[in-house]
Amino acid sequence: MSKSRTLAAALAGAMVLTPAAAVSAIDAEEYLARFEGTWEGGGSVIRNVDAGPLNVSCQVTGRKESGQMSIAGQCRAALIFSRAIGADLTKKNGRFVGTYVGSIIGPAQLAGSKSGDSIRLAMTWPEPVNGDTTATMILTNDGTGTFTMVVADEIDGETVETTRVSFSRR
């Protein structure tokens, strides 16, 4: 193939790929917008593996700016505890990075990517939780007015959901 044909083929390929990349960026912005508004929900949280799960009720508010999203609010377990929770995410170079608050040990760092209707994030705690400093958070929002937040951690060699809260738009 001649140099001019190779260049023409490369340019044609770039023209085909460029609109797809633009759609991907728009999809990420539209996806983040799904979390905007006021939400309430409930589920279970394991604060201590020896004590088992607690039922919680939560209220959060989601906000979105260009390439950024924050979810912040409160969860309570009857009269046992009330805790501020939140996640701040920024889209950088096709990945999401940010922080999660909700643990008494301090904020966890988040890093991950979007796949379909979910963002899968590696969590890194400032000190060990359940024997290590890592866990996984999955935020899922299919655009129908609900979303879930699941935190999974490896405990004694098994993956355990330490948090599962489902939210509905108010």
Image (tube, rainbow, N blue to C red):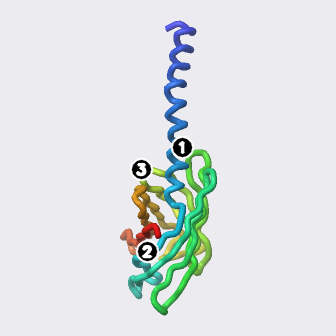
Badge 3: residue crowd in 10 Å (few <14, some 14–19, many ≥20) = few
Residue 66, percent across and down?
A: 63, 51
Residue 53, percent across and down?
A: 39, 82
Mark 2 vs mark 3, CA separation in Å: 23 Å
Between discs 2 and 3, the one toward the N terminus:
2
Helix or strand or loop: what does disc 2 sit on?
Answer: strand
The disc labelled 3 sits on which kind of residue? Gly
Q: Residue tagged by mark 2?
A: 41
Helix or strand or loop: what does disc 1 sit on?
Answer: helix
**Residue 38 appears left or right of 126:** left
The vertical placement of 136 against 104, above or below, is above
| Farthest residue, direction front | 170
Mark 3 vs mark 1, CA separation in Å: 14 Å
Residue 152, percent across and down?
A: 43, 68
- In this view of the protein, can residue 142 be seen by the observer? yes
Q: Residue tagged by mark 1?
A: 26
Task: Please report contact status of discs 1 and 2: CB closer than 8 Å, yes or no.
Answer: no
| Farthest residue, direction left | 158
Between discs 1 and 2, the one toward the N terminus:
1
- Tell me which residue sits at (48%, 56%) in the image: 119
The vertical placement of 16 against 79, above or below, is above
| Farthest residue, direction top | 2
The disc labelled 1 sits on which kind of residue? Ile
Which is closer to the viewer, label 3 or label 1? 1
Between discs 3 and 1, the one toward the N terminus:
1
Q: Residue tagged by mark 3?
A: 116
Task: Please report contact status of discs 2 and 3: CB closer than 8 Å, yes or no.
Answer: no
Q: Quadrant of residue 46?
A: bottom left
